[in-house]
Amino acid sequence: MIGKAGEILRAGGLVAFPTETVYGLGGDALNAQSSQKIYAAKGRPSDNPLIVHIYRMEDLAPIVREIPQKAEALAKAFWPGPLTMIFEKSERVPLTTTGGLTTVAVRMPSDAIAAAMIKAAGGYVAAPSANTSGRPSPTVAKYVEEDLSGKIEMILDGGQVCIGLESTIVDLTVDPPMILRPGAITKEMLSEVVGEVSVDQTILRSDSGQAPKAPGMKYRHYAPKGDLTIIEGDRGKVCARIEALSKEAMERGLKVGIIGTDETVGNYHATSVKSAGNRADESTIAKELYRILREFDDEGMDVMYSESFDDGGIGAAIMNRLLKAAGHHIERL
Ligand code: AMP
Ligand code: MG
């Protein structure tokens, strides 16, 4: 299977594959036509750059202008893993792959299937998430098939992904390094290695109205078809408010979905109540969030209510995606 995937990629075709974050839609990163095919298959705006995936450190130097010392330190600490770094690009990377930018995003995934496939493809695989643009990223192969079947040559099925949210993106062309998208490698983890780390203000909780530095973050993304609202505040009050909103919407004949947690789902009544996971271990919530959003679509939910999550650790990434899915509809109690 890996050998065949490698052949397809070398010939300019597209292969979806598992990574530890979400499923990726891969094409040869150094082939402009392959990148074009990726944008077309996803319906992705062509100014939204792709991440170049490598499988070994020595393949980084040829595609970037320089490797800052802090990038070297971060690679040593977190590669292979869910960290994407932005560099000035070299001539070898086509502008189509970088959405017209002179910088390039690079990641080395830890997933064994991904690593083997990148190697078989010749070392450089451009891959955004393997979903139709605007939909939640796929965490199992079934959702890749739903979105992209017939539009790509092959899907490698590696079961459910481990993390469930896209990689942390850090810009290393500025100093201090700047987080452009939160993920499983948290600000705290990055700071431990390189000291001060800044955060692109546009990705924080309030809708700043400014253009984010990662072009992709400006698009509506991760969005379910129905209306999602996040309720935030004292836990007990949140539960009561969600329950009241659900009751009222159901009385109006709407189909209502609720995203709770293991600790709270027993208290809710709605058309569909789902636990995102356990508050004691927020990585469980990261892993299930996109599946839940997709299931609510399949179940035809008109409105959805979700509890909010804490900003520490991976909670920052969970809230970032949830806020985007909700179009920043949040009720603070
Ligand atoms: P996806 O792989 O679907 O998660 O999308 C890749 C994300 O990386 C998008 O949000 C892009 O805007 C972002 N990205 C890729 N390349 C760059 C770059 N050179 N500079 C800033 N952001 C980038
Ligand atoms: Mg994506």
Image: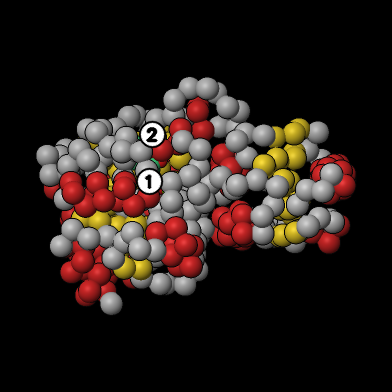
In this view, the mark in front (1 or 2) = 1
Query: Toward which corner of the image does residue 198 lie, by quadrant?
Result: top left
Residue 212's spot in the image, x, y percent? Answer: 44, 29
* Label 1 – label 2 distance at C-alpha: 15 Å
Question: Which residue is at a point 29% across and 32% down the rendered structure image?
Answer: 173
Tell me the SS state at disc 2. helix
Report the quarter where the N terminus lies.
bottom left
Tell me the amino acid under the disc marked 2. Pro
Tell me, yes or no, if residue 295 can be seen here: yes
Residue 265's spot in the image, x, y percent? Answer: 79, 59
Q: Is mark 2 within 8 Å of ligand 1?
A: yes
Rendered-image quarter of ligand 1: top left
User: Which residue is denoted by mark 1 in the rendering?
Assistant: 43
Q: Is residue 287 left or right of residue 39?
A: right
Q: Is residue 70 left or right of residue 216?
A: left
Q: Colour scheme used in the picture? A: secondary structure
Using a 10 Å C-alpha cutoff, classify the residue at mark 1 as few (fewer than 14 neighbours), some (14 to 19) or many (20 or more).
Answer: few
Image: 233 above or below 139: above
Tell me the amino acid under the disc marked 1. Gly
